[in-house]
Image: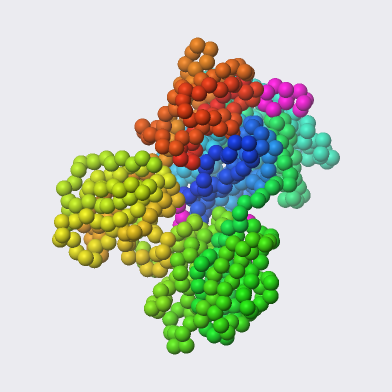
Amino acid sequence: MLSALKNTGFIFLALVAFFLMGCPAKADTSARPEGTHDRQHLVFWHNTPQEMEVYKIYGRREGPTIMIIGGIQGDEPGGFLSADLYADLALKRGNLIVVPRANFNSIIQHNRGPEGDMNRKFEGDLSQDPDRPIVECLKELMAESDLVLNLHDGSGYYRPTWENDMANPNRYGQCIISDAEVYTHPETGRVLPLGDYARAVVERVNEDISDSLQKFHFFNTNTAATDSKHKEQRKSVTYYAMTKLGIPAFGVETSKQLPSLELKVHQHNLAVNAFMELFGVEVEQPRINLAPPVLGYVVISVNGELPIAVANGQTLEVKKGDTIEVVHVGANYDRGLSVDVQGVGGFNDIRQPLKIEVPTTIVVQKDHIKFGRMNIGLLPENYAGVFPRLLGEGKVIAPRAGTPVMVAAAQKPEDGGQEPAVDTGEAGRVEPAAGAGDKGNGPAATVETPPAGKGKGGVLAFLLEVDGRPVDLAVDEQLVVSAGAKVKMVDIRSDGTLPKDTVMNLRGFVPPDKTGYNNGEDRGATADTARDMMPAFSRGGKGLVYDINAERGKTVLASASIKILVPKLESVTISFGGKTHTLKLGGRIGIPVGTPVTVQKVVLAEGMPFSKPRFTLGGRNFSAKLPQTLTMPSFAANLAVFEDGELAGKVLWFPK
């Protein structure tokens, strides 16, 4: 049955942890280069209980995209530990979107849903629900997919007919669940043979399961039917994907009663692998990873005390005769790492206590490649400040998302020292520790005047640079930029009466060098609007509008603002067969295989202009100069729209 279905066209990370509330931050989302395989690692709501990591894995050859969701309910570890394994795959063909821990808060608490069952939140009003941002994000990711798998651990063993109290139609373990036998999407007319898919997977999985009790079965909840016993499923991931997006979606359930966690994970893997085989997503092993080594930090203990993370280029000053020990290298590789404390140790000095009598340098290598260097200096004999002392403006980052590090505040030589700081894990930004003092800092640009200001408190305007271009932003005006624009705080233009101790504060932004007390002065600093802003300090906490203030102490003398627009697809207009069709974000259309299709127009929401557009079909780049004529492939393919490396959205073409 597997081979028969293939022919239908659906050919699939020790350290002391100090956390601050982070903000949604994501990695680069640009499309993979044509003819290569690549991956993206996105992190949302970083270093918070809601942190969600997303892995997008692209095959060497085009093909369908399968989305794997684990941990939407935190007391079901088989599912999220299985999903975790797929984040490191390499693919020959097709693509994966892997969300190992969709509901990290529930996993931390080992609770089905501290804010309620997230798998019952994909329909209805979530305006006051704390899980709303996660649900909306999952919806967007599903819209990029051709198949959705939601991994769970269920009670007992599902059986179509009653066998005993633990094996009957009211149990959920050991089954593949769909919401219908066959579903026809009303908007696209696409027919989804869900039962056939599920039975083919069950057949394949059961070949590797010898225990009859552990055999899988197909469970059709018949969710849409008026007499369905499972109407609650109408608010689930799978029902949303089926009815709103018109794509096949399945729940994969292993039994909570299986004798070991390892067995649960293994049997989840069997099911996911079978779906990948069925839909033609092919695995390539081992994965080839030749990315350049990147140093996040080196963790050094002085005299056996609490370790400190030292960034590339920084200087750690100790007292003459102190013993240092490099206890960890934080990099984007786990193996092949060495450090050389020059003139003191041997070729590899990791975890070697070494006495420091003279200044020296630590060199970090991956195999033979030197990729990091920091200095060890000696403190003056009469030094009475914070010990040891960390100097320099190196950027302490977490090279892997979610790696917490403790950082000593970088101190100027004349300083007596500052409070420690805690790295949020985001590249280029170290925030002050709680209590260290924060005054709430925080392509084409347009200015909106809501109305125009005439100057306040001696302030006439804020002088900025946006991607290197000067902008004179008047009081009360609003600067509109696309996410990713680099906005530099240059100066305040005044009428000459402005107090000299006035600071220019971009709320929601902390410059990378403000590792100690932050007085709110941002002049000279540049904010990456896609990575550096903290939504908690935006207007309404929505991460959209950020104030630029002229402040004296706690008094705001005048303000302007920056509105950051994230590119979002409005529509794609195509034509074929003499007819024109306009597809909204997430829209789908059936097209005969081999048909010439002309992409006429692509529009971004809110009238946002393109500056650096990129378009792909089935993961392959095509020219952004429109109109552009393409040929409909023999499989369902996403037409993806990117603006300046940011994914704006997708529409789907499927074979008719």
Colour treatment of the image: rainbow
Q: Can you say whether 436 is above or below 416 in the image?
A: above
User: Residue farthest to the top?
Assistant: 578
Q: Nearer the viewer, residue 199 or 487?
A: 487
Predominant SS along the magenta part: loop
The region drawn magenta spans 1-23
Give the residue drawn at x 61%, y 82%. Answer: 355
Give the residue drawn at x 19%, y 46%. Answer: 453
Q: Is residue 448 left or right of residue 267?
A: left
Q: Quadrant of the C terminus?
A: top right
Give the residue drawn at x 76%, y 23%. Answer: 4
Q: Nearer the viewer, residue 122 or 619?
A: 619
Q: Is residue 108 magenta?
A: no
Where residue 5 sits, quadrant-wise, is top right
Q: Quadrant of the N terminus?
A: top right
Give the residue drawn at x 48%, y 76%. Answer: 389
Q: Position of residue 613 (x, y in %)?
A: 46, 35
Where residue 296 sits, quadrant-wise, is bottom right
Q: Position of residue 407 (x, y in %)?
A: 50, 68
Q: Can you say whether 303 is above or below 553 in the image?
A: below
Q: Is residue 19 magenta?
A: yes
User: Residue farthest to the right?
Assistant: 210
